[in-house]
Amino acid sequence: MKTKIIIFEDNDFLREGISHLLMLRDEFEVVGSFSSGLLAKEKVRDLNPDLVLMDIEMPGASGVEAVKAIRTLNQRCQIIMLTVFDDQGHVFEALQAGANGYLLKRHASDRLISAIEDVLSGGAPMSPSIARLVIENMRNARATQGYNLSDREKEILRSLALGNSFKMIAADLGISLETVRTHIKKIYEKLHVHSQVEAVSKAFQEKLV
Amino acid sequence: MKTKIIIFEDNDFLREGISHLLMLRDEFEVVGSFSSGLLAKEKVRDLNPDLVLMDIEMPGASGVEAVKAIRTLNQRCQIIMLTVFDDQGHVFEALQAGANGYLLKRHASDRLISAIEDVLSGGAPMSPSIARLVIENMRNARATQGYNLSDREKEILRSLALGNSFKMIAADLGISLETVRTHIKKIYEKLHVHSQVEAVSKAFQEKLV
DNA sequence: AAAAAAATCACCCTTTTAGGGTATTGTTTC
DNA sequence: GAAACAATACCCTAAAAGGGTGATTTTTTT
């Protein structure tokens, strides 16, 4: 059986280029290629690929969102992110979302094939600069078990997890509502979330409380 | 030692009446009586009573809030709620907050003394109509383990607990945002909470998810 | 068949949160 | 002693959530 591949990439030129590159190989079969990640979940469900190549920067739905959507129904297929960015935020988000590899577009042409072979054999291919970011992040994570929340932040997160509103927390701690908000913003940043529920959910699931 | 009692009741007439009623008994000592529950926590801390009589309907802070505040620092003292309401919401809230007894004001004059004796000996005095509500609630709770959430409601609560926003839930389930909101309201009602965080917190703590 | 419960959608209005800055004061750390 | 972090506080705007009411349709139960 050939390895079934789907490509999500808004740049027509790049998408076609990758597609042709892969079709030169007998072991690969491009079963679909799309210029938007909007229907990624449905496409994956219908086409059941072994591998997904996902651009991060696409109009409509970001590649990260698409990956999250895919992972809600399929943990089996491998996903390699394609991007021009190598900043920490994007990398972290994508890997959290469930991507298996992370390739910079400027490395795509000469490393894509080996990257694909890597993920299919259980590896986690990524561009060198990405790898550096990841190990730095790992070291930080290990060094400071948890998410490096300050004592005050932990206190506030615990209170939040008990169901308290910002107002209640402020009153409890005898500080202003704005200060609570400042702490909360910092907590969101550190936990990589964007709402109360996400923070509390993460706090419970990762036993921070 | 006399039993030290604090009264929180905004109706001057009733407060004085109760106070005098209790002072007729040698075994009771009214160490404080206030027309607002705003400083309940501080009063309890300073006066360290054995028993608190708490009106539910007071201007400023509700008796339920006052009870919650008191319970954050003192689980020892007994608390009897005084109220004109016998609806399920108030009863449930007050008992959840940590009240030990629940007396309707129309029963106060002739049952207050025995109610006080009851709580002090570990009982849970309440007016008959209240008792009925409570046992009905208990039966329901037992009959339908959990909180009697419908399948759809459980589904939505689970999604919420994963950190999804209303909008995301609506998209996931293919229903309108308003419908999600309606379900959420029903969930709050059933779980006796009033916000996302409270609901999610409860869901995790009671392993509904 | 009638009644009750579940699921759906809609509109109103208010409060709370989110997200974006900026700033001051101490402590740590390098 | 400069740089980084923690804790505090405030401003502004937009989005999200909370609370209330009402209504239709389908399913379930009685």
Image (cartoon, coloured by chain):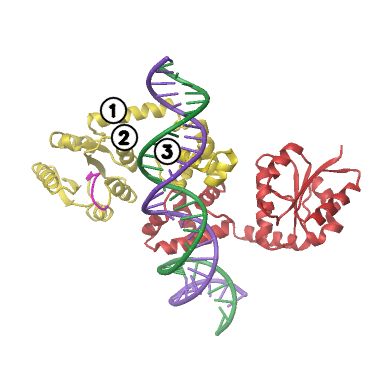
Chain colours: A red, B yellow, C purple, D green
For residue B191, the mark is 3
Dominant SS in magenta: loop
Q: Same chain, marks 3 and 1?
A: yes
Is disc 3 in contact with disc 2, using a CB cutoff of under 8 Å? Answer: no
Q: Is residue A126 visible?
A: yes
Give the mark nearest the N terminus, 3 or 1.
Answer: 1
In the drawing, what numbered circle is on residue B132?
1
Q: Secondary structure at mark 3?
A: helix
Kindly identify the amino acid type of the residue bearing the numbered disc 1: Arg
* CB-based contact (under 8 Å), mark 2 and mark 1: no
Give whichever of discs 3 and 2 has the lower sequence position. Answer: 2
In the image, the segment drawn in magenta is: B53-60
Which one is nearer the viewer's eye here, A180 or A154?
A: A180
- Name the kind of residue labelled 2 in the image: Gln
Q: Quadrant of residue B95?
A: top left
Residue indicated by mark 2:
B88
Name the residue at 83% across, 52% down. A16
Label 2 marks which chain's residue? B
Element class at badge 1: helix
- Residue at 18 percent across and 38 percent down: it is B105
